[in-house]
Amino acid sequence: MLFYILRRLASAISVVIVTLIASFALFFLAPTDPAGVICGNRCTPERIEAINDSLGLDEPAITQIGLYMKGIVVGRTYTTAGGVVTECPAPCLGYSYTLGQPVTKMLADALPVTLSIVLGGAVVYFGVGVLTGTLAAKNRGSTMDKVAVGTSLLVNSVPYFVVALLVALYATVFPPAQYTPLLTNPWAWASGLLAAWMTLGLTNAASYTRYSRASMIETLGQDYIRTARSKGISERRVVYRHGVRAGLTPVVTILGLDVAFQLTNAIFTESIFGLPGLGLLSIRAFYQYDLPVLMGTVLLGSVVLVLMNLVVDIVYTFLDPRVRLG
Amino acid sequence: MSDQTVRAPQTVARTPRARSADEQAYLEVSDLHVHFPTQDGVVKAVQGLSYSLPLGRTLAIVGESGSGKSVSSMAVMGLHDRKSTKITGSIKVGGKEIVGMSERAMMSFRGADAAMIFQDPQSSLHPYFTIGDQIMESYRSHNRTSKKAAKERAIEMLDRVGIPNPKRRVDQYPHEFSGGMRQRAMIAMALVNDPKLLIADEPTTALDVTVQAQILDLIADLQRDFGSAVVFITHDLGVVAEIADDILVMYAGNAVEHGPVDKILGSPLHPYTWGLLESIPAVSGTPGPLHPIPGSPPSLLAMPSGCSFNPRCEFRERVKDDLCRTLRPDLIARTADTGRASRCHLHDPDRVFEAEVLPRLP
């Protein structure tokens, strides 16, 4: 098991490194003009050169990547033309061109916001989806089943950002969206994120209703469910112990990968509700050519994705005794 | 195939235990109908089935797929979905009426008074629970005991069905068992509450032949020890000869022949039973062509009028007035032997069998 995790971590790291190189090539070697962005409108060529020099942008691409990676591992020192030395401790992802803040700190501030939204939303959509899906499967063909399937199709066919926009504009029942750290005030944390959770949760619940319904219908038709019934246990126990245990295992796998994927949806959620998470950060960086910040969000996103994959595989060994790692 | 499954069955049919007149039926099925209403019409899977079975005896129900063997046995266990199944008639197990029984009463009946062993132990055991958990659940749902006591009972049962090292095996998952061991575990689970009625639905079909023989021996052994009534569903006449006291031959949702095993395999009275015997290949002697039953079973949505077997029956012209096509025969004694019944209009089936069918049996 330990060996397996180590091996998977090694492969995870290599995936992240490839992502890093690819996105570095895309962003930094693209015909952009970071020094111009930093310097502003009235700028002398000398000043631009000085900026390029202090950020290492005049170095060859391969050296730049090397410096960037070195910064992540051991930290990095920037020296401006005026001789001002700035220490950027590991993991150093550089400084925002527009705000001058260390990217690491910006990411560290934004990550809890995004995680709060994504995980809170996941609780809502997994809970609602699995519950309605299981009930629909159990009462297959009933009015309740038809309503659940119809609603989920309807919800799924409306683009997510439209729903989020409508909620943000018209759903005045929710407290205004804002972010308060969980540890500062749990109540304010929850009420400020409620609108985002509900939007993210209810739209995605539609998919989970269908995943769990399909999986539960298949499971409830299995021979071992008939065996369970023949033992003389209650139908409730048959469905919720024997059925759910087997039927929801594949749905949990989807959930793990989905949580990582929802980081993309966070761009919409955070932009529409004005929550200062990774999505908002990356959108702002994108429009402002703030390459270090953009690079940082991409890198963090890939780390989360790879980690979630690993977590899913490990969790699966606990859920399905037939799966052995090694 | 091993020789025990393909030997001409009439040569090995064991002599059934004599049936004493005062034996009381533990399982009594009378005029059972099981219908499934569907969009295409009503599927009449079982139509007026009646039979009875005392404790200590084994009844083999044989017939093609779709003849209603499994459906009628599932009805005995109350395993049909109440919403999509219409069951009429009567099923009495130990005096209790099963048809129309409340779900609550059904829960205490299932697994305690009657238990079932299924065809494929691989798919019939829950893949995510240990063998011990599954046996314990069955035990604890009918007995108020501690987990520890239930586990001891599970170990005891695994030991009883011949699983080596049961203390270790009890904590393993089904995928860690071989096919035969899984079926033994299924049997242990079915018998954990000492049910008086055991229904085995093709329990050896998914197993390889050497294991088949062991499982059959085990079931026979356990039946002797527990004195239970066993309904054994199969389409393997070799297995029937090994294990059964009585045979019920089913065709298109009904019994067409019923009687002691040696009589039915030795001198059957129904053309359908003749066809079944003729379809078994011989392993010794000169291999000749098989003589299978022509055609296929009728649709359960649109049954033929008269005898349900008449479209496939080569002897129907022997019956006067086209009776086979117009009148459904009753399941009654056709010969002097009253211990057996057949559903056929032929007035001399024993002579027809001896003169025409017996010579061409493989």
Image: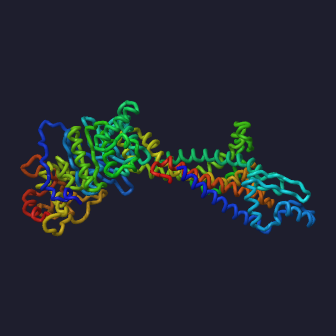
Q: How is the image coloured?
A: rainbow
- Which quadrant would residue B309 be assigned to in this image? bottom left
Of A141 and A89, the residue lying toward us: A89
Residue A233 visible here = yes
- Which quadrant would residue A261 be assigned to in this image? bottom right
Picture residue at 75% right of the left edge, 44% below the top: A178
Q: Is residue A228 left or right of A270 when viewed as pictured?
A: left
Q: Is residue B34 left or right of A280 when viewed as pictured?
A: left
Q: Position of residue A227 (x, y in %)?
A: 36, 45
**How many numbered discs, if any?**
0
Q: Position of residue A90 (x, y in %)?
A: 75, 51
Q: Position of residue B63 (x, y in %)?
A: 23, 55
Of A295 and B252, the residue lying toward us: A295
Residue B53 in the image: above or below residue B324? above
The quarter in which the C terminus of chain B is drawn is bottom left
Q: Position of residue B310 (x, y in %)?
A: 19, 61
Picture residue at 12% right of the left edge, 48% below the top: B15
Picture residue at 23% right of the left edge, 52% below the top: B213
The quarter in which the N terminus of chain B is drawn is bottom left
